[in-house]
């Protein structure tokens, strides 16, 4: 179980590395001269977001290069350096800089994997799972990423939006994300011998009160989900925190409260 959890942690960290490209957003925001706002922040991030770091074609050499670096640093550095060179040559210096951050993040996860006792083969497998799955999750929450970068070709032209009402698409994205989180929690708990029910307190039901926010929040969508997300996260925080409980109970009760809150809002909206 401990080894399985370690591999899962490594896969999760690799899955987070593609979003290192958003670090350009504050720089782009400053260069644009726009005022500090969420819309301006995301507009600045779109210059580099979901391109180099979200490519399925680059995911494999990044995973291989980061893993190879552990045993053959020269070979690994050559592979990763080649990725940076390709990005810079195809798109320009800014893309090359983002590629540098991407490969450094992947290297950091590979080093941590070794510290956790995860072998080379399992590190490679975890890297492939994390890097190759991340872009598909983004199909629910924004514009399609550059799956085939650096090729000038489109794998998927539009995000997943099956409903006529864009608010329903937000509920779908929320359900996918929360479902993925709960799947990870339940599997990790099973491996660690933790009973989730013992750590979810009845106060998680307070999340149902978030349904009342439908009276003050405009109809949220994937493109304008700030109020909905902030409200759900806030509801989870209020429902989870209590001094008597430990961190695990805080997290699981808070997650349950946030889940109830999002579901309650969706029911109120549909009603």
Image (cartoon, rainbow, N blue to C red):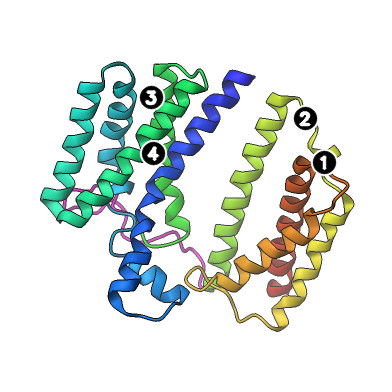
C-alpha gap between disc 1 and disc 4: 32 Å
C-alpha gap between disc 1 and disc 3: 34 Å
Asked whether the residues under the numbered discs 1 and 2 touch, taking CB atoms below 8 Å apart as contact, a structural biologist would say: yes
Residue highlighted by disc 4: 131
Residue 99 in the magenta stretch? The answer is: no
Q: Position of residue 193 (x, y in %)?
A: 76, 25
Indicate which disc, 3 or 4, sits on the residue closer to the N terminus.
Answer: 3
Indicate which disc, 1 or 3, sits on the residue closer to the N terminus.
Answer: 3
Magenta part of the chain? 145-164
Dividing the picture into quadrants, the one containing residue 182 is top right
C-alpha gap between disc 3 and disc 4: 10 Å
Left or right: where 39 falls relative to 69:
right
Left or right: where 14 falls relative to 215:
left
Figure check: 267 above or below 84: below
Residue highlighted by disc 3: 124
Residue 199 badge: 1
């Amino acid at each position: 179980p401990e080894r399985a959890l370690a591999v899962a942690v490594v896969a999760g960290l690799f899955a987070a590395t593609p979003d290192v490209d958003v670090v350009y957003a504050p720089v782009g925001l400053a260069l644009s001269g726009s005022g500090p706002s969420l819309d301006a922040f995301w507009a600045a991030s779109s210059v580099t977001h979901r391109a180099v770091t979200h490519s399925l074609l680059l995911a494999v050499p990044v995973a291989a290069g980061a893993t190879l670096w552990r045993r053959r640093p020269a070979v690994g550095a050559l592979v990763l350096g080649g990725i940076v060179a390709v990005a810079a040559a195809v798109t320009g210096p800014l893309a090359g800089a983002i590629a540098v951050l991407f490969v450094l993040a992947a290297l950091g996860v590979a080093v941590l994997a070794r510290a956790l006792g995860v072998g080379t083969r399992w590190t490679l497998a975890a890297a492939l799972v994390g890097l190759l799955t991340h872009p598909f999750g983004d199909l629910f929450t924004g514009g399609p990423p550059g799956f085939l970068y650096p090729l000038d070709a489109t794998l998927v032209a539009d995000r997943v939006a099956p409903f006529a009402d864009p608010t329903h698409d937000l509920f779908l994205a929320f359900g996918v994300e929360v479902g993925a989180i709960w799947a990870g929690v339940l599997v990790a708990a099973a491996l660690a011998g933790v009973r989730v029910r013992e750590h979810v307190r009845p106060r998680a039901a307070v999340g149902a009160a978030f349904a009342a926010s439908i009276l003050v929040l405009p109809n949220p969508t994937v493109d304008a989900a700030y109020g909905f997300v902030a409200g759900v996260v806030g509801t989870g925080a209020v429902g989870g925190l209590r001094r008597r409980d430990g961190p695990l109970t805080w997290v699981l009760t808070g997650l349950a409260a946030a889940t109830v809150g999002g579901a309650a809002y969706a029911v109120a909206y549909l009603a």
